[in-house]
Image (tube, rainbow, N blue to C red):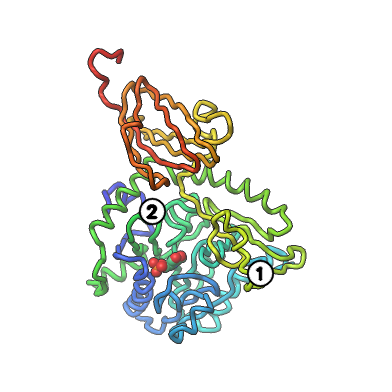
Amino acid sequence: MATSGMRSQLAQETRRRITFLGICLAVIGLVLTARVGYWQLRGEPARNVIVGRWNGYHGSTVAGASLGGMKAMHPIGGLPIPGVEHVAQPYKFGEGFGEDEETFYARCAQEIEDRILAVGPENVAAFIGEPVQGAGGVIIPPASYWPEIQRICDRHGVLLVSDEVICGFGRTGHWFGCETFGFRPDLMTFAKGVTSGYVPLGGVMVGDRMARVLIDEGGEFNHGYTYSGHPVACAVAVANIRLIQQLGLVQHVHDDVGPYLAEGFAKLRQHPLVGDAETCGLMGAPLLVQDKTQGTTFPDALAICMVCRGLSFPEVYEPALLSPRLYIGVNTTFMGEEGYDGRGRAHLAVKWDEAGRQAFIIGANPGARATTVELEFPWSVAKVELLDWNVPRFRPTERVEVRNRKLLWTFDRDEGMLMRVTPLAAPAGSDD
Ligand SMILES: Cc1ncc(COP(=O)(O)O)c(C=O)c1O
């Protein structure tokens, strides 16, 4: 897929092989296939059962909806398919209200082990989960939860599958959610963030333990899709990953905007209608509840998130899902007062690539009025390219340029953008 440097950085020890699929939905089917193939080759063909979690989400295909635990999806098509078991999700407000935190989360992990023992470890192939349940309401477990699951899987020889379709590629403040939560999956599915959603691409990373068996003993992996490894999608992924690296976006989420979001959410927790407001990197979901003292949620029929439409939350039930672009800026973090318009409106961040040969500007003006900012660069003349912007009428034009070391930029209301600035040779006769 990528250059060897990129590949080695992303696919470290435990994730040696990557299979790219043209589309994301195929990913979970491949997980099913791989687990069966692996255990057959290992001489334990009875290991067929996969344990997932209630309210987990792994897509809408037969495989995905079966492994997922969204009950409303199951009656359609007689799902789940045989060989899938579901256990409790770590949703404290909904399923452990009033219970001591430590006891509740330990109980959730223990349920996995109890189910493995009930089914018989010799029949269990894998456990699958999203590091943070995304579609299920951004359910963020404590640091102790995943390492405990790892210990349980290791104890019973069960494969661990991390569905990183949402958490992968920086969302949680590390490249992958399993790094944030400290576990080592045998399989990792990924999609959205690999191309930042610009074109569809999904894939499965296979850890050493499985890869060795599947390749050395299995030979050809006879499984594929029409659009597997589509070169256009892979090229977009390479460009996207390069940009994530150049911009230092994972670090940006970890060090800057993630803590900033967490700080904001901490204030929300005081609100009488907010039952919980945890964040993980750049994802979170204030839980809107009827009575936080009694643990009562609103009836589904009220569609409570409709009330929040002005804030453009998607309409789910009580959690108001939030997952902003990774490159949103935090005012003044990088530029100090120079890059800030002083009236508290335009938020700017400037990142230099390691060699200082180009800079990226991330900016947004959430205010209601236009505002102009002035940025200074070490180059007298530079090319400015707009890589992304959120204003449909807007086109990259000549009006954006660095002249005499300065870039003047007028943000219209609600405008946000990402620019790359690269130096050009100074015109003959200039000072440089
Ligand atoms: C965690 C997770 N896994 C799998 C999927 C399935 O992806 P697709 O909708 O492309 O099938 C999704 C989709 O949102 C997801 O969030």
Taking depth in this image into account, of 173 and 401 the one nearest to the observer is 401
Residue 41, compared with residue 160, is above or below; it is below
Give whichever of 241, 51 is nearer the camera. 241
Q: What residue is pinned by disc 1?
A: 94
Tell me the quarter of the image containing the C terminus.
Answer: top left
Q: Which mark is residue 33?
A: none
The three-letter amino acid code for the residue at tag 1 is Gly
Q: Position of residue 389 (x, y in %)?
A: 40, 44
Task: State the residue at coordinates (68%, 58%).
Answer: 274
**Residue 197 screen position, x and y as percent:** 38, 56
Number of callouts: 2
Mark 1 or 2, nearer chain start: 1
Residue assigned mark 2: 196
**Residue 355 visible to the viewer:** no
Residue 295 seen by the camera: yes
Whole-percent x, y for residue 53 in the image: 53, 73
Q: Residue 204: percent from the left, percent from the top?
A: 35, 64
Disc 2 on helix, strand or loop?
A: loop
